[in-house]
Amino acid sequence: MAFCERLSEQLAVVATVDPISIATTAVSTDVVAMGMHRRALFILSTGAAVQAPGMDVNIIEGLDAACTATTAVILTRAAADCAAVASQYLFEVSGEAMADGYTYLRAELDPAAGATLVSVVVLADVDRYHPASDRDLASVAAIQAAN
């Protein structure tokens, strides 16, 4: 049998929004430094709550590690398009799609109205160094695998 890295070794958990109920205040993921990654996948889960009219979701690219200076929206989903209850939304960004000099990403979730249950996990591939699990967030409590 050929050797194959586990998915937990190929993909790093690089940003999150822990499960939370948001009503009127926007929340953001951790900032993802794309210097080691070719692609990042933002996985947004919405829970069963008062969802309509949804929330604006923006994937922001930035020039600095705080992702605040000179930012631009690279992907967006309007509140009306993100109003389904108990759903998942995937946003994938490749480093090649980012503007020149922009090497940082984060997601911003802004509820339009009403309570919204959300969580976000951001997975990134690791191009230069392996295993990717060495760069998981500190909030990753355990990795288990059945071989």
Image: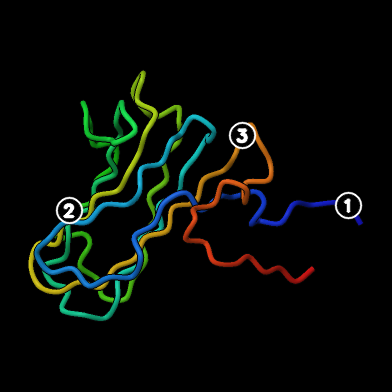
Mark 1 or mark 2, which is nearer to you? 1
Residue 30 percent location from the top left of the image? 35, 48
Q: Secondary structure at mark 2?
A: loop
Q: Quadrant of residue 26?
A: bottom left
| Residue shown at the point (35%, 65%) measured from the top left | 18
| Mark 2 surroundings: few (<14), some (14-19) or many (≥20) residues within 10 A | some
Quick one: label 1 or label 3, which is nearer the N terminus?
1
- Disc 2: which residue: 78
Between residues 48 and 19, which one lies in front from this camera angle?
Answer: 19
Quick one: label 3 or label 2, which is nearer the N terminus?
2
Residue 70 percent location from the top left of the image? 21, 26
Q: Which residue appears farthest toward the top when viewing the image?
A: 100
Q: Amino acid at mark 3?
A: Asp
Mark 1 or mark 3, which is nearer to you? 3
Q: Which residue appears farthest toward the right when viewing the image?
A: 1
Question: Considering only vertical position in the picture, is 128 above or below 121?
Answer: above
- Disc 1: which residue: 2
Question: How far apart, in angstroms, are the residues tagged by discs 1 and 2?
Answer: 45 Å
Q: Amino acid at mark 2?
A: Ala
Specify whether 26 is left or right of 140. left
| Residue shown at the point (33%, 70%) measured from the top left | 19
Q: Quadrant of residue 32?
A: top left
| Residue shown at the point (17%, 54%) measured from the top left | 56
Q: Which numbered circle lies on residue 79? A: none
- Disc 3: which residue: 127
Specify whether 103 is left or right of 79. right
- Location of the C terminus by quadrant is bottom right
Between residues 23 and 43, which one lies in front from this camera angle?
Answer: 23
Mark 3 or mark 2, which is nearer to you? 3
